[in-house]
Amino acid sequence: MKRIIVACSLVILVALGYVFGVQAQSAESICLVANTTAYKTGETVIVAVNASAVTPVQGFTFQIRYDPACLRPIHASSPIPGMNGLPLPQLTGLVDGSYASITPQTVNGVLAEVRFTALQGCQTGLYLESAALAVRNTEGFAAPVASVLIGERNVSLNIDRQAVAPQPAQPESGSILPLAPPPAAQGGFASWIIGVLILLLLGGIGLGAYKVFRIGSTDRITTPTLPRKATLHVKHGPHAGKSFALNKLPCLIGRDPQNDICINDPHVISRHAQIYSKRNGYYLRDLGGGTFINGHPVKSNAVVLHPGDVVRLGKSALFVFG
């Protein structure tokens, strides 16, 4: 009898050890789901970013790619208590959502609901391009949770060309995050003519002012000076809340510790961007890592920086130039 009791105890211990081992190895996961995939033109399309995590988190991010000819993003809402939306510059065709909380929260279900307006009849889909859970590290900065598994990424949608009447706004709870894309550029012959006339007018005013102020001042030479020392104010990423004065130019930014500003972010490359001075101003050059100013990608060699410009490196490192 004693041997039977000992044997049963061993079996129970082994079983418990197996269960706890599975739980310890269970990875945090994020996926994109939709309760309905058939809509009519004008209806509100709703998808959810779901997550399951053992680790209490203090934030999350997600990027969903969509077809702007079929869908227009409206906003996202998070039902998690204490999660607040962090507005980011949006790109046409890509929803960029980010939430943060000052206290750790347990997540097991809906992280956020994302809403779109169906624009016309089409066969389209949504793709979860990236997603991450965040915690606060020992230094007080936001850091991504390691080994997060991204599950289902695709949601296929069938939008009927038949239009419906405008839908009344449905009450929502939680933190609302606007996701409106930048307005489309307006073209046409009339706007082109107006633009040319404005340029000619400004050119004439500038030429007249140059002639007036140039008279009697040919013997006086002024040396252009740079504006006051600029600063980068980090709003989101590993150094959120900190500011970096641009005392040394050119200033290299990237993940490599040898840079003038080191950003230890997995989506920032070793030498990501450079800020330098030229012709009495500040310029930003992308070095191949993906850099955005006010939501627009930096595609040319360099772009001039103005006070208040929002600069994003990679997917989540965000700072304001000032």
Image (spheres, rainbow, N blue to C red):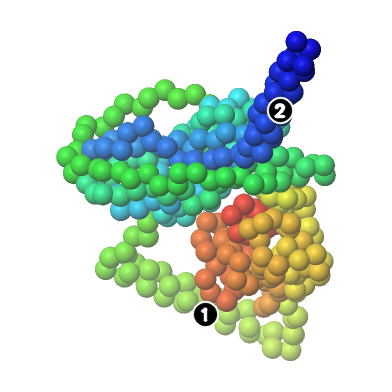
User: In this rendering, is residue 82 above or below 195?
Assistant: above
Q: Mark 2 Cα within 10 Å, few/some/many (few <14, many 20+)?
A: few
Classify mark 1: residues with Cα within 10 Å, few (<14), some (14-19) or many (20+): few
Using the image as rendered, state which of residue 23 and residue 301 is in the foreground: 23
- Depth check, front residue: 274 or 283: 274
Q: Nearer the viewer, residue 35 or 255?
A: 35
Three-letter amino acid code at the position of disc 2: Val
Q: State whether residue 197 is above or below residue 293.
A: below
Position of the N terminus, as image quadrant, is: top right
The residue at 69%/84% (across/down) is: 217
Q: Earlier in the sequence, mark 2 or mark 1?
A: 2
Q: Position of residue 13 (x, y in %)?
A: 73, 24
Q: Is mark 2 on a helix, strand or loop?
A: helix
Q: In this orientation, does residue 54 appear?
A: no
**Direction top: furthest residue:** 1
Question: Can residue 89 be seen at all in this image of the molecule?
Answer: yes
Q: Nearer the viewer, mark 2 or mark 1?
A: 2
Circle on res. 309: none
320 to 39, vertically: above or below: below
Return the residue at label 1: 207
The residue at which mark 2 appears reads as: 14
Corner quadrant of residue 101: top right
**Location of residue 229 by image quarter:** bottom right
**Distance (Cα) linking label 2 and label 1:** 88 Å
